[in-house]
Amino acid sequence: MAVDKIKVELPTPDYYEAEVKCRNSCPVHTDARGYLMATVAGKYEEAYAISRATNPFASICGKVCGAPCEKGCRRSDVDEAVVIRNIKGFLTDKHGPETGDLRTPLSYSIAPGCVDPELNGKSVGIIGGGCAGYTCAHDLARLGYRVTLYERWEKSGGQLVQGVPINRLSRKVVADELASIELFGNIEVKHGVDVGKDISFAELEARHDAVYIAVGLAKGKRIPLPNADHENVHIGLEFLFDFNMRDKWDLTSSRSIVIGGGDVAFDVARSALRCGSPEVQLACLEREHLGEMTGSVDEREGGRREGVVINDGWGPREIVVEDGKIKGLTVSKVVRVFDEAGAFSPQMEEESRLIEGDAVFFAVGQGSDLAFLEGSGVELTPQGWVKVANEETQQTSKPNVFVGGDIAHGPKLFIDAVASGSRAAQGIHSYLFGEAPRSLKRKLTFTDLPEYGRNSIYVDDGRDEREELPVKPAEQPEFNTTVEYLDDAAKKQSARCLECHIHPTFEGDICILCGGCVDVCPSYCLSMKTIDRVDGGAELKVLAEMEFGSMEVAEAEGSVMLFDPLKCIRCGMCAQKCPTGACKMSVNEFEDCFA
């Protein structure tokens, strides 16, 4: 009987790079592994420098990032992911711009250029003062460009100051991060300039060698429900703008209903409590227990803790109005949100119930006002975003106009906007100087470790979130409840990192095939097989022929050691057990650079 062969992959540099999934999951490829290890060693400034290397908004990400690095963390294969974002928050509190030192953080960037560049004679105009716009300005300034940033409102920051409630993100942290970038003498920020009204897009094009559009998606949407035009039905983003930038609404006599299940919906719900709403109900199609809700776990837990009632899996049918006043929202139980192909195609039961309330807030999608682009020749997408003609450079249909952030790619995380801004800066430089665009690369150095040992505590320690202080939202609307780790807690949590850049490696010439490494492995990540049992493609065939002369001899006489990195906990017991030294723990060191 034929036996199915085991599919194996021979490691390449790309394989080893992808194996550190926290870094590969980050849009700007921050070396989370690096700053976790430096934190364990108590090298906090070095750790902060690593976190800041590819991200001029490290302090923001330490507070409110959606943490895609944690979604990729291999520790979740053992129990729960490492609290990577929280460690970054711990580090930025010690060495970020919020400490008062605005200049030193600039020196840690590895983006091409320097902190004190010579001007190159070129000028770039940037529309929008959020993460994408400021990141692009930061990277262009390092290259010697004169950058003028046009911000519509009186404050920079985009959704950092307009959308994220002040109780979640200190405005001092935001202001200091922006002020650090503004230390570049070749960056000029013009507030209160509404492009299309105060200055035309054509004038910007004439004034600058290139233009970067980073206006974001700050315009909320409605869904066509009966009575959606009632005066007490509101757009969540407009409410958040007033909450953060203007005067807070008085909701003391309004039971609030929020439609939506993302982070914006929870920001609206929690802000409504801070405006005195005696009751806040949230209704969304997505079902939490199936992992369909897009809102972060932090937001959901914070909302529940403060009193938000979550009605997940209930779709809106009608806003009920009686005698001119809102009575509530009729909802039906959701049968499905997505169809078999994964497309958004909700179905609801006919039976419905009423969620009582006096005011309704839509938090169901975002758009933008691009009237300033009419007649410009810049193409838009069917969704109303700016069309990206070249993803590598972020160029639009007009060669001198570039775009990034949510207006180019739809609603995403702040860190995605940072990545987009950085990519656009290199695209602009490539366009203006006729060079190939540079992107983030890694140099790998593979070495054996003469000694390797870890105590077993790191496997047993569980994930501990930052402490959250109790709060009365209506009485303390701006109080940030999050308490950063103390040193010992930060080190302990960082030590949970599995150190995925370290691997067991084997020297076949001195291996005696005793199987001790396989027997001692606590996670069963090693196995020894004869070559005839594995399928490694052409690469394995080449290696087998080099070692044994032919594939036939290899399959008759040879063995291979198989390693499953998804199971390995990097304990090093295999190397300790090996009687001949054939098994060693080896390390891949990474150096990030642009090339």
Image (spheres, rainbow, N blue to C red):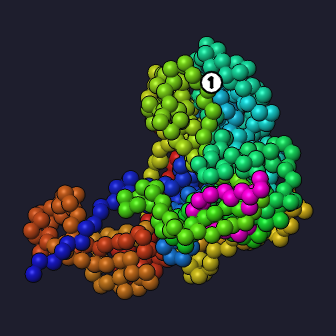
- Residue found at x 55% / y 19%: 376
In front of the other: 411 or 325: 325
Check disc 1 and give the amino acid type.
Answer: Phe
Q: Looking at this view, name the residue that lies furthest to the front.
A: 323
Where 124 falls versus 227 (above or below)? above
The quadrant in which residue 518 appears is: bottom left
321 inside magenta stretch: yes
429 inside magenta stretch: no
In front of the other: 57 or 131: 131
Where 476 falls versus 459 (above or below)? above
Residue 89 visible somewhere in the drawing = no
Question: Mark 1 = which residue?
Answer: 372
- Residue found at x 65% / y 29%: 127
The quadrant in which residue 509 appears is: bottom left
- Residue found at x 31% / y 84%: 515
The percent position of residue 391, horizontal first and vertical second, equals 45, 36
Start and end of the magenta stretch?
A: 308-327
The percent position of residue 551, horizontal first and vertical second, equals 12, 65
Q: Main secondary structure of the magenta part?
A: strand
Q: What kind of element bears circle 1?
A: helix
The percent position of residue 586, horizontal first and vertical second, equals 44, 65
In front of the other: 456 or 132: 132
Tell whether 288 sits left or right of 584: right
Which image quadrant: the N terminus? bottom left
- Residue found at x 66% / y 49%: 228
The percent position of residue 457, horizontal first and vertical second, equals 60, 81
The quadrant in which residue 286 appears is: bottom right
